[in-house]
Image (spheres, grey):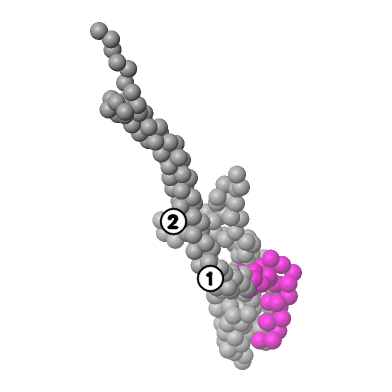
Amino acid sequence: MKVKKAGANDPRSVVSQGVIGLAICVGGYMMTVDPVNARLASAKAEEASLRAQARDAEALRDIVPQITAASARAKAEADRIHEAGRLARNEQDLYAALTSIANECNVRIDQMSPVKVTTKAAPGQAIDPNASGLNAATGYAIDAAADYTDLTRFLRRIRTELGYAVVKTVRLTPTMDTRVKLVQAYIETEHYSFDASPVDLSASTGGAR
């Protein structure tokens, strides 16, 4: 018995050819569409990321003037603090300023000598010298004589005109001469300067990588 070869019009041949064609079509679809889908997904993700970055940059650009103004105000304040502590960093100028104010207030300075300033912590707390912000501190012990009004004016001007100044101690002793209204005064002052140098941002971030 002879087996007849399937002709072009044989249903089995048509089905076989259809299956082969479908496989080719499916394979062609996957090779064409999948890479495009992947590229499209990547492009859309990149577009979304860039749009977000653009929004952030736009928002930052809008507040740059505010940041600049705030930075300028902060620098000006730091400069004022630095200047207010100038006398504490220059003992000669501080001595001259104290003497000048005393003369203007009719206070007689009998003796004035520098004293060491010790920073004290609040009860139960410790002072970290590196975190205190101080970069200079000096003090004076003053023996003076004046009437009460002039002495009060002298002390007030020390506190208000000599930067970061503190009148730490005042001890008054009346004079033995009742004909004059003078008092003897022992005064201790303290004068401070603060470190106003810019913050090193690289120190807190570990520096550039």
Pinpoint residue 129: horizontal percent, then vertical percent.
Answer: 56, 55
The answer to whether any part of residue 14 appears in the image is yes
Structural crowding at the residue carrying mark 2, measured as other residues with C-alpha within 10 Å and reported as few (<14), some (14–19) or many (≥20) = few
Amino acid type, mark 1? Ile
Magenta region, main secondary structure: helix
Between label 2 and label 1, give the one nearer the viewer: 1
Pinpoint residue 26: horizontal percent, then vertical percent.
Answer: 37, 35
Q: Earlier in the sequence, mark 2 or mark 1?
A: 1
Q: Residue at x 69, y 65 (%)?
A: 89
Per the rendered image, the range of residues in magenta is 78-105
For label 2, the residue is: 125
Contact, mark 2 vs mark 1 (Cβ under 8 Å): no
Q: Quadrant of the C terminus?
A: top right
Pinpoint residue 64: horizontal percent, then vertical percent.
Answer: 57, 69
Structural crowding at the residue carrying mark 1, measured as other residues with C-alpha within 10 Å and reported as few (<14), some (14–19) or many (≥20) = few
Q: Residue at x 35, y 26 (%)?
A: 8
For label 1, the residue is: 63
Q: Nearer the viewer, residue 171 or 101?
A: 101
Residue found at the very far bottom of the displayed protein: 179
Q: Residue at x 27, y 27 (%)?
A: 11
Q: Nearer the viewer, residue 198 or 163?
A: 198
Tell me if 74 is positioned left or right of 90 in this view: left
Residue 103, image quadrant: bottom right
Tell me if 102 is positioned left or right of 54 in this view: right
Amino acid type, mark 2? Gln
CA separation in Å, label 2 and label 1: 40 Å
